[in-house]
Amino acid sequence: MKRITSFEQYTTEYKKSIDTPEKFWSEQAEEFVWKKKWDKVLDWNFDEPDVKWFQGGKLNITENCLDRHLKSGKGEQVAILWEPNHPEAEVRKITYKELHLEVCRFANVLKRNGAKKGDRICIYMPMIPELAIAVLACARIGAIHSVIFGGFSFKSLADRIQDADCTIVVTADGAFRGTKDIQLKGIVDEALEICPSIKKAIVYKHIHADINMKNERDVWWHDEIKFVSSECEAETMDSEDPLFILYTSGSTGKPKGVVHSTAGYMVSTDYTFRNVFQYNDGEVFWCTADVGWITGHSYLVYGPLLCGATSLMFEGIPTFPDAGRFWQVIDKHKVNIFYTAPTAIRSLEAMGLDFVKPYKLDSLRVLGSVGEPINEEAWHWYNDNIGKNRCPIVDTYWQTETGAIMISPLAGITKTKPGFATFPLPGVQPVLLDEKGVELNGNGVEGRLCYKFPWPSIIRTTYGNHERCKEAYFATFKGYYFTGDGCKRDEDGYYRITGRVDDVIKVSGHLLGTAEVENAINEHPDIVESAVVGFPHDIKGWGIYAFVICDNERKDEDNLKREIIQTVTKYMGAIAKPDKIQIVKGLPKTRSGKIMRRILRKIAENDLSNLGDTSTLLDPSVVEEIKAGAL
Ligand code: 7RM
């Protein structure tokens, strides 16, 4: 496997990728199996936006994830190493050969149930190998997968199914999560009541829950599999055919269906996986993210499989049966590369070192971090206690929309600084802009992080609404892709992400739109209006602070708050539960009716002294009331 092996080489590769991007990326793309080679490397225009990579090329990504490795003699190597929720339950080891077979089989099941190239298929599953099998089976037949995180609840699931007009949902009876059983099928049933586009639900039996199977619509995975062959030729896809949709939160209440295309996504995830983690053949790679998020798509499924790696998949949670679970799994499976989120590190740090001490952790070679800025304290704890000061930490910065890691050290090659994502990967051209959109040159500057040139796995559109893609990413600063993040380039040219500058919050590494949480809160019959902002939280990074207006005089505030939390859990999922709820009589609004979130944010952060100019408010007195009741 070719990869960058020194910082000097990084510098030359980087330069090459900027001076001759088409040459650079076509050399990367040569490594894959193509049914037909591309005619043109790149066509792009950020105004539309319209970006096309490897036009005219024909391929199937699963041939590159699976068939290619069988041909090169990797058939017996473990592709997916599955660790169950219950430590005493049986581990599953699925070789490349077996995975190929299962993917082909399930691809035939999808076909048997009416799936065709271009159809959208919703996958709502626990973290079990069948989730990866379903994803790859879609790709095998050219259906577009839309994986919905299993922690989302029925309304979030239904919204996403409707937005993409999915025709099939692949699910399971339920999931194990620590001591809890999650009744996935029940949630699906509720969602499907308002999703007429779904013709079939294919259900995998996992927790042996007592569930309803609706005649005609619902079929069992284990039954269907008996009717099909284990051979399935890979559908021929154009480079630019969509591979998947993945929903991400935005500043409106409606999530955006980020669309990734086939060839570009393949090239970027493979390249970044190899180089960032410096993956060596035979190593065990563990990404703790759920496949329901982009990190799981790119670094649990596609990136590792493209590189022929062994990818560990874990169904459970970090604190079950105790807070040593991650470290126990690392020793048990001799994990070499461990990739997790700062929020997990902070929560395990808070549990104390007694949970770490029993484990050797001597198989570890590289540690990774993703999802939010890693604070220095967590970085040092991770470095000292998990990496034992001998494992480089890669702080990888990227987004659902970028498909692959953008700014990151290369493990063991880039000199790191705690809290810094360090330098752009080859092919990535970051710029920092001031509010007016002027590029800030040189070092020691801070601004809005944008990219001025496309990379292969850049977002192509937002499903069903191209205008929204343009609005959200390409309109704020003309000619640039805007990340929505603030960023600093220090005196040495190192990049440090300072956080979101829009109305989304990263709660425990999950991106949530404040408007989406507000919509869920407003489902409570007694709530007329709400405003949600983030506040700094020791473990979660950011917590959710909700200001709510109640329309009937409820004397039982505690009950009301409990009900609001239940409502959010029911409609959106437990990840969106507010940490603090303040009942208020009014919200600070401008004369045009816009909520001044800046003021609410200051109050939530407990920075009451400097609320800025409140004179443009319709009724400045509400601010005093809110301040007085601040939590
Ligand atoms: C991969 C992922 C994207 C947002 C992004 C940032 C934040 C992600 C880092 C980070 C600082 C990091 N996709 N973010 N990684 N901030 N350092 N290493 O998380 O679409 O869910 O979120 O996450 O704000 O814009 S995402």
Image: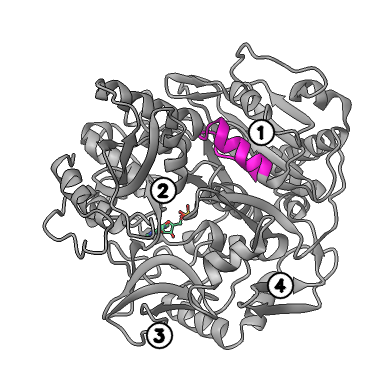
Q: Amino acid at mark 4?
A: Lys
Q: Nearer the viewer, mark 3 or mark 1?
A: 3
Residue 616 visible? The answer is yes
Q: Work out whether mark 3 precedes mark 1 in sequence or the reverse, and give the earlier one.
A: 1
Q: Work out whether mark 2 precedes mark 4 in sequence or the reverse, and give the earlier one.
A: 4
Residue 127 visible? The answer is no
Q: Quadrant of residue 59?
A: bottom right
Residue matched to label 1: 130
Other residues around mark 1 within 10 Å, as few (<14) / some (14–19) / many (≥20): many
Compared with residue 560, is residue 342 higher up or lower down, i.e. above or below? below
Query: How far apart, in angstroms, are the residues tagged by discs 2 and 4?
Result: 33 Å
Q: Work out whether mark 3 precedes mark 2 in sequence or the reverse, and give the earlier one.
A: 3
Q: Nearer the viewer, residue 161 or 427?
A: 161
Tell me the SS state at disc 3. Answer: loop
Q: Work out whether mark 3 precedes mark 4 in sequence or the reverse, and give the earlier one.
A: 4
Tell me the SS state at disc 1. Answer: helix
Query: How far apart, in angstroms, are the residues tagged by discs 3 and 4?
Result: 27 Å
Query: How far apart, in angstroms, are the residues tagged by discs 3 and 1?
Result: 48 Å
Left or right of 625, for residue 469: right
Residue matched to label 3: 438
- At x 83%, y 21%, the residue is 216
Q: Amino acid at mark 1?
A: Glu
Magenta span covers which residues?
A: 146-162
Residue matched to label 2: 514
442 is within the stretch colored magenta? no
Q: Which mark is residue 52?
A: 4
Residue 388 horizontal/vertical position (percent): 27, 49
Other residues around mark 4 within 10 Å, as few (<14) / some (14–19) / many (≥20): many
Residue 337 horizontal/vertical position (percent): 45, 50
Left or right of 391, for residue 606: left
